[in-house]
Image (cartoon, helix red, strand yellow):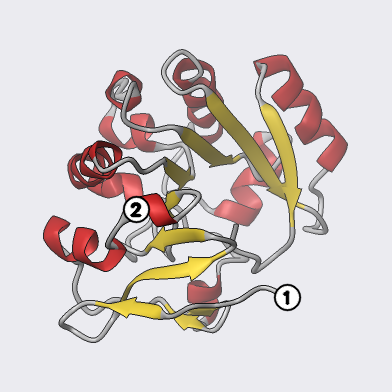
Amino acid sequence: METIRHTKRSSENQTVAYDLHGNCYLNITNRCTLRCRFCPKFNKQWDVQSYSLRLTQEPDINEVLNAVGDPSQYQQIVFCGLGESTLRLVDVLGIAGEIKNQGGRVRINTDGLINWVKQEDVTPLFSGVIDALSISLNAQNETVYSSHCRPPGHGAYPALLDFIYRVRAQVENITVTAIDGLEGVDIDACKEIADVLGVVFRSRKLDKVG
């Protein structure tokens, strides 16, 4: 049976880091690129796996590092809250670099749209700093993707595929995911896309952090 150790909080009494599956998960922003219909926060639910992830203020780098403590006690330090961590890319890379210096392993769970947001290829910045990426593919085509994820403009889905293609050269361990059971999502077709891109595919369950 999984043991939940404790919730780590910042001085604002909010969850900045939380323990699951032997990993330390970092909740550094509630801002998102997308407005996914299946996301808890867009259904007025901020609790995930018994942790309240609503932030009143984004934690700074020192708050995050203090919340982590010794990173070597975890399998991985994972950027994964109810927001898109790469929207704070400079801070993410700074935190990740320090965690790596202390012997930790770093993963980012991401929507894969940071290049689209910034309108430039930032994937080289991940090299040597990020050990693994879990990227939310979420659908086998743009129509289904847009229906569920509701991007704020056109071109998000092809940009996501391009990000996956580009970041393979920078990060060794890449997994793309889709939620099994969402209407219109073809899990087998999503796996085929992953195979073509040369990355690992994993189907996941709704509301399960990992």
Q: Amino acid at mark 2?
A: Pro
Residue occupying image coordinates x 42% and y 49%: 152
The percent position of residue 165, horizontal first and vertical second, equals 53, 17
Q: Which mark is residue 71?
A: 2
The percent position of residue 71, horizontal first and vertical second, equals 34, 53
22 to the left or right of 189: left
The answer to which image quadrant residue 199 occupies is top right
Q: CA distance from mark 1 to mark 2?
A: 23 Å
In front of the other: 9 or 201: 9
57 to the left or right of 145: left
Q: Is residue 175 above or below residue 124?
A: below
The percent position of residue 173, horizontal first and vertical second, equals 55, 28
Q: Is residue 66 above or below residue 169?
A: below
The percent position of residue 202, horizontal first and vertical second, equals 73, 42
Q: Is residue 61 above or below residue 140?
A: below
Residue occupying image coordinates x 54% and y 84%: 50
Q: Quadrant of the N terminus?
A: bottom right
In front of the other: 107 or 208: 107
In front of the other: 159 or 22: 22
Q: Which mark is residue 102?
A: none
Residue occupying image coordinates x 29% and y 47%: 87
Residue occupying image coordinates x 72% and y 16%: 196
The answer to which image quadrant residue 206 occupies is bottom right
Reading the image, the residue beneath label 1 is: 1
193 to the left or right of 72: right
